[in-house]
Image (tube, rainbow, N blue to C red):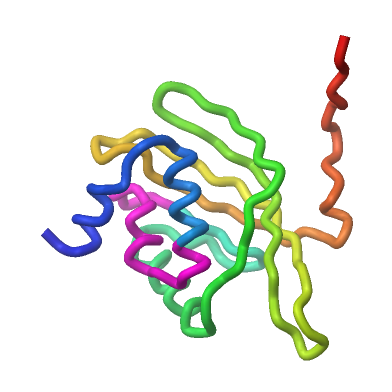
Amino acid sequence: MTQAKLRAATLGGSADDIENAFYEALHTADIQKLMGCWADEEDIVCVHPGGPRLIGAGAIRAAFEAMFANGNIQAYPERIHKIESLASAVHHLVERVEVMTPQGPQKAWVIATNVFHKTPQGWRMVAHHTSPGTANEAIDVGVKPMVLH
């Protein structure tokens, strides 16, 4: 069994656990851990802001390896909204991405949707779709305020 298969087999828990492992892998530029978060299916999909649709583990791995060649990725999930069922979970969120620019550290916002399925190996990501955000992403549209009675 390959190292990636062993690592994938040891990841477990919930969709939240897999999502946390995914972002930790981005922070540490750990391609093995990152790929261990993905389902072992041919039709997994990933879309980065402004990029093409990447289908399959090979294309997804190659894209993240190219990104990691420039260092780790400091993306932090914020304002996560979840839709969950027995065998699938959809998390839509805002990623706060910290990037170094010639002017110093800056924040960028990315809108993300992460989709998870419960597989024989446990919860795994089957889709990660991101779109560029704006400086105004600090505010969600259509969120109902909490009212205490």
Residue 41, how many percent across, how many down? 30, 48
Question: Height in image: 136 above or below 84?
Answer: below
**Image quadrant in which the C terminus is located:** top right
Query: Where is 48 relative to 17, above or below?
Result: below
Splitting the image into 4 quarters, where does residue 145 fall? top right
Left or right: residue 119 versus residue 149 is left
Q: Residue at x 86, y 46 (%)?
A: 139
Q: For the N terminus, which image quadrant?
A: bottom left
Name the residue at the left extreme: 1
Q: Which residues are magenta?
A: 25-44
Left-right relation of 148 to 17: right
Work out whether residue 69 or residue 48 is closer to the camera in this orientation and state it.
Answer: 69
Q: How many marks?
A: 0
Q: Determine the residue positioned at 31% across, 47% down.
A: 11
- Residue 136 lies in quadrant: bottom right
Residue that lies at the very extreme toward the front in this rendered image:
149
**Horizontal side of residue 39 vs 135, given as left or right:** left
Is residue 42 shown in magenta? yes
Residue 25: where, in percent of width, then height? 45, 63
Q: Residue at x 78, y 90 (%)?
A: 102
Examine the structure image and report whether residue 105 is included in the region drawn in magenta: no
